[in-house]
Image: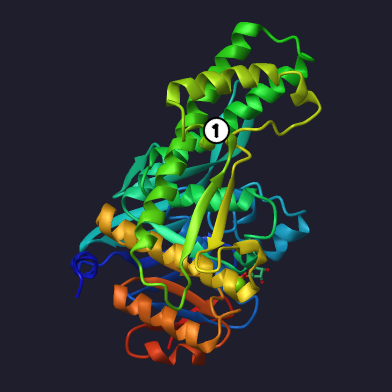
Amino acid sequence: MDSLAKNILSVTDKKSGVTRLTLTDFRNYAFLRINAGLHPIIITGENGSGKTNILEAVSFLTPGRGLRSSRLADIKRFTPAVIDNGYSPINNSWAVAATVCKNGEDFEIGTAVENIQKEDEDETSNYNKRIVKIDGQKSSSQVELGKYLSAIWLTPQMDRLFRGGSQPRRSFLDRLVYAFDNEHAKRTANFEHLYKQWYQLIKTTNGHADRMWLSGIEENMATTGVAIAAARREQIARLNRFIENEPDDVFPNVTLELDGTIEKMLDSMPAVDVEDYYMSKLAQERKNILYNDSIDGVNRTDFKVFYKKKRMPAELCSTGEQKSLLINIILAQTKCQILYQGFSPILLLDEIAAHLDDGKREALLCKIRDLGLQAWITSTNPELFVTLKNNADFFEVKNNLVIQK
Ligand SMILES: Nc1ncnc2c1ncn2[C@@H]1O[C@H](COP(=O)(O)OP(=O)(O)O)[C@@H](O)[C@H]1O
Ligand SMILES: [Mg+2]
């Protein structure tokens, strides 16, 4: 056994994952509790029974808007009464709570949307707020969740990741970065907020906004943007270096690249100079933003993936090959997290068997088992997972209930 494999095993010996999941008013579930082992969890059921909803709930235990990038208001369980009222429940409360195990130590974490009543002098208003709790204490930020649980997901929508526009690829990459750099989640949210503020200010003043105010926002965008670019570069380099030493087997090795002006400039210029460039570029673009709402910068960066041996861009590969390349990235990321972060992420694999031939599905299941990972896997067909018969929990979803098999 090589030293890498030994290192990985020494960490995954102390397993991590969700051991108890409780949902309240989440999508189709009024109340649901699942006790899970730290190994694969196979969830089967008919189309529309609520399999993906369970994976989505688990994904809310990590920072962000979950694996569907949903609007918070869509998640509260709709009942016929709510639907008759025009889909706008006043009370949008829902909750996901869990016991998570991190390297053998248990923590209680949870997230919820609460309906808050605000009383002003003469009127009462309602609003919904996302809250996070860790071991019973309210936490100020979702980012805290990332310290207890890390999740990597693959969904059927991602089968088209390499073919469509760059935004989902950028989000995918940024999630890989978060796992190593918690601050990255704050930075990307902050950049998005600044960009909107900048755009609105220019638009509402028709280009005549206070210059000091504008340059203040631009300076902030430039420093945040360069930090985002640097963190992305670091993660790409880390994964490429790691894959370099990996065997090129069932899931073909990839080469990863960043296609972005700011990221490229960091190849040859110190960060402070790139910040100055970015700031002056934004100032020059003030007029253009009124006609083109996406100015070049870290908000336009693309994440390019190549089938290494064939030197083929992923978007030109077959659907099955593209899925295999994604699995290669995810496995490399998982191993890197185990090695460098010291705890394993969980995998959320929605309808994973689609586009994978039998050999590849089996190979993936064996890798998950051998790495000692907790993986939440959905499928309409439980027979595809017999390999894991003695190494997994099997659940069936029916009539908004989950039955252990
Ligand atoms: N907010 C909600 N309240 C109640 N039911 C919902 C809500 N959002 C989605 N659903 C229902 O959840 C079901 C889809 O669940 P999903 O987990 O995607 O199914 P699948 O088992 O195919 O993965 C649909 O029947 C849909 O009507
Ligand atoms: Mg589904």
Q: Name the residue rendered at 76%, 23% in the picture.
A: 288
**In front of the other: 314 or 75:** 314
User: Can residue 92 be seen in the rendering of this structure?
Assistant: no
Give ligand 1's quarter of the image.
bottom right
Judged left or right of residue 361, residue 297 is right
Residue 390 higher or lower than 177, as above or below: below
**Image quarter (top left, top right, bottom left or bottom right) of the N terminus:** bottom left
Vertical arrangement, residue 242 with respect to residue 281, above or below: below
Q: Is residue 105 left or right of residue 362?
A: left
| Secondary element at image label 1 | helix
Can you identify the residue that label 1 sits on? Answer: 262
Q: Position of residue 220 (x, y in %)?
A: 52, 21
Residue 318: x and y in percent read 65, 73
Expressed as whole percent of the image width and height from the top left, the position of residue 174 reads 50, 47
Q: Quadrant of the C terminus?
A: bottom left
The tally of labels here is: 1
Q: Can you give x and y, in whole percent of width and height, for residue 59 in the image?
A: 47, 59
Mark 1 closeness class: few <14, some 14–19, many ≥20 residues within 10 Å = many
- 85 horizontally vs 63: left or right: right
Q: Is residue 252 visible?
A: yes
Instruction: Name the residue at 60% across, 79% down.
Output: 355
Q: Amino acid at mark 1?
A: Ile
Task: Quadrant for residue 305, please give it.
Answer: bottom right
Query: Is 281 displayed left or right of 154 in the figure?
Result: right
Q: Relative to the observer, which residue lies in front, 116 or 198?
A: 198
Q: Residue at x 45, y 42 (%)?
A: 233
